[in-house]
Amino acid sequence: MLGRVLCTVLLVGALPSPAGASQGHISVILLGATGDLAKKYLWQGLFQLYRDQVSSGHSFTFHGGALAALEPGQRLMFDMLKKLSCPPDEPPNRCAVLKDQFLKLSQYHQLKTAENYTALNREIETLLSQEGLEEAGRIFYFSVPPFAYTEIAGHINGSCRPRAGAWLRVVLEKPFGHDLPSAQQLAAQLAGFFREEEMYRVDHYLGKQAVAHILPFRDQNRQFLDPIWNRHHVERVEVVLKETVDAKGRTSFYEQYGVIRDVLQNHLTEALLFLIMELPANVSSAQEVVQHKLQTFQALWGLQRSSAVLGQYQAYDSQVQEELPEARGHVSTTPTFAGVLIHSHSLRWEGVPFLLTSGKALDERVGYARVLFRNRAYCPQSGTLRDAGHSQCKPKQIIFYFGHGTLNTPAVLVSRNLFQPAMPKDSWKEVGDRSDLHIFGQPLSDFYMYSPVKERDAYSVLISHIYHGRKDFFITTESLLASWAFWTPLLDSTSRLPPRLYPGGVENQQLLDFEMVAGGVEFSLAEPAELLHPGGQMPSEFRAIQSQFRQSPLVSAWAEELIARLASDMEAAAVQSVARSGQFHLALSGGSSPVGLFQRLARHHHGFPWQHSHVWLADERCVPLTDGESNFQGLQRHLLQHVRVPYLNIHPMPVHLNRRLCVEEDGGAELYAQDIAALVANASFDLVLLGVGTDGHTASLFPRSEHGLEGAPTVVLTESPVKPHQRMSLSLPLINRARQVFVLVLGRGKHDITTLLSRVGREPHKWPISGVSPSSGQLVWYVDYEALLG
């Protein structure tokens, strides 16, 4: 009987107990006790917990549960337990005694039905009564597939909760859903059985020593980091996890999840949050850490299809066919490699790229988080003439090295030309000169390097935190749902995107290299012909094409790609104009078509010279500027509030003067024309962005308008056939004085007018857009496939 064994261990055990009464009994129940995770990590972690806490005053029993019947399940479980090991510094005799005790305190149960859980509870209660033990609490570790969570949670809540006054800790393994709706559903189901403080969602990366030390490192080195931990000094942040293994044997799991769900949404995101979140006053407070994580999520720009590059190693599809008979004939688009670019609009990080990268079948196994600092130094003297390690011309970086790779150990590295960090000497030790090793092209002698005094497995660390009730190393419901809300749009937008094929290992060479382009990422090299996807092209594979429309250049693509191209062209025009004249005058139309463009400019074009730009309106509705229908209000909401345009460089149209809207005697149109004449050389805008209405109108110049289609280059009041009727607009002659005019046409609803415009000549009184023809500039049409082809 387990009771007699427990009594023997407590009273006759070879290790002395501390003076004083027992602190209570803890029952640890491992569900999925014969599975792969239990075999590799969890039993070893529980044995580590027992070794660490055997003299703490608590008594323990360990219950392994699985679906297998008693005899085969017990045999499987104890085969695992016999292979448990102690670290090298543990005296062999002590290890042997502790292992023997642990095995005697462990028992297998078939846990398949509600009756099985009732019987388990009865056995625990009997043990407590017979031995006269006070119950401290119970730990249920769910090492089972998530589809089983709800049923097991019901059994525990119904018949296996601890006595009143004792705590319950339920440990849940990922995946926690596969998108936001599924995560919300699972969270709601579990909330019906357990309180938030009872649930410990495991992300084992939070147990890795280098990851777990990011926040303490930032806290202990505030004096050095506070001045430089911002967009003025940080060039970029990278979080990387590379694996050499492939998904063979796990394709049933991988087909459901892929690399983004498996690694980026959880492990790499958590490490990134530790790096970029505002530091809480108390980094050990789970509540404060969670609140700062949530604030960080809120400051991240949403992800789009252009935010990621995806790959798949060549053998993956054949492995799917082999392991999943139901997938025969199906061509998998599941990514096994991903590189994702993330941006924040916070004051601290605006414009700094955060790069998250992970993949299988790569050239090495390594994981790290790296903060690379800008380097403004120039050193004319040869590096051999001075202390090269401290040279200001060397790269400046801080690296949290998760393990494996060149170093083969967790480590924290700080460039010597930054500062010597403060590190806790009881848990981290400085590593001596290892100039024979290099990392990111630099000898280790260029860094202050620290490694753990005692390396610990991530699961052992987390199991210890569960025992101590430390929630700051686990994922809360709020944080989980915030993460899924951030990642789900990217997963949806790339779900049918064919990934780039790569051969695997060192043969990948530069095939997976990618670069930041126009606020997104693209592979640096074209895909070799022999690696292209079989079969015909999918619409998402089409690239932007150029041709002619109304004798002017035409750029056409799917809407998202078209807007990306237009935004890039606008930025290039702005940079060129500032280089030429020191400023850039941009006139923007309102309406719904440019909203996506404004958002892209705000989120992805951090090289746009906003400080030297003047923003004008091509047209405006005669409503107060605070009204939701105001073109300026839309421009403000989607663009201006997110970029740094000097206040005096923003020029809304004066439609609201003397508490009246567009009254001719108030002279608002004349005032705007005067401002343009005073500030814009030759009243020639550098760029005017226009749209096209289904009736052929552009800006607020409508068919058969009495004003604005001919005459002087000025600003006019016009009448719209739809409410609000009164408008203010640049005149067609003024538009045609621009150096460049870009016309954006989006959507199937514009197909008829696009087709008509392709056939008619210059008839501005019928179709005002047909009168757009810059006298000494260039007109470019940006038309998406739906508008062009229907």
Image: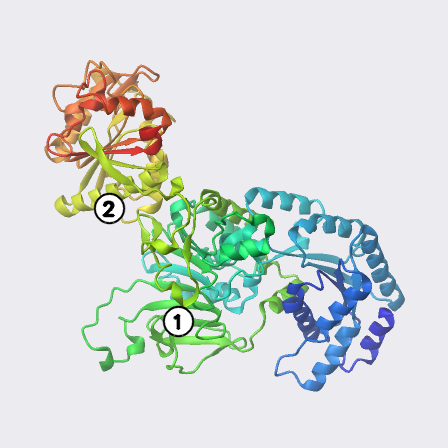
Gap in Å between the C-alphas at discs 2 and 1? 33 Å
- Mark 1 neighbour density, 10 Å: few (under 14) some (14–19) many (20 or more): many
Residue at coordinates 71% horizontally, 71% vertically from top-left? 80
- Say whether residue 377 is left or right of residue 315: left
Residue 79, position as x, y percentages in the image: 73, 72
Q: Nearer the viewer, residue 140 or 616?
A: 140
For residue 743, what is the image quadrant? top left
Measured along the vertical axis of the image, is residue 52 above or below residue 350? below
Check disc 1 and report its element: helix, strand or loop: strand
Q: Quadrant of the N terminus?
A: bottom right
Foreground residue among 550 and 430: 550
The residue that mark 2 highlights is: 609
Q: Is residue 43 visible?
A: yes
With respect to residue 316, does 378 lie above or below?
A: below
Mark 2 or mark 1: name the one nearer the start of the chain.
1
Name the residue type under label 2: Pro
Disc 2 packing (10 Å; few <14; some 14–19; many ≥20): many
- Residue 127 at what x, y percent from top left? 86, 65
Q: Disc 1 designates what residue? A: 414
- Residue 564 position, x and y percent, is 32, 42
Is residue 642 at least partly visible in the picture? Answer: no
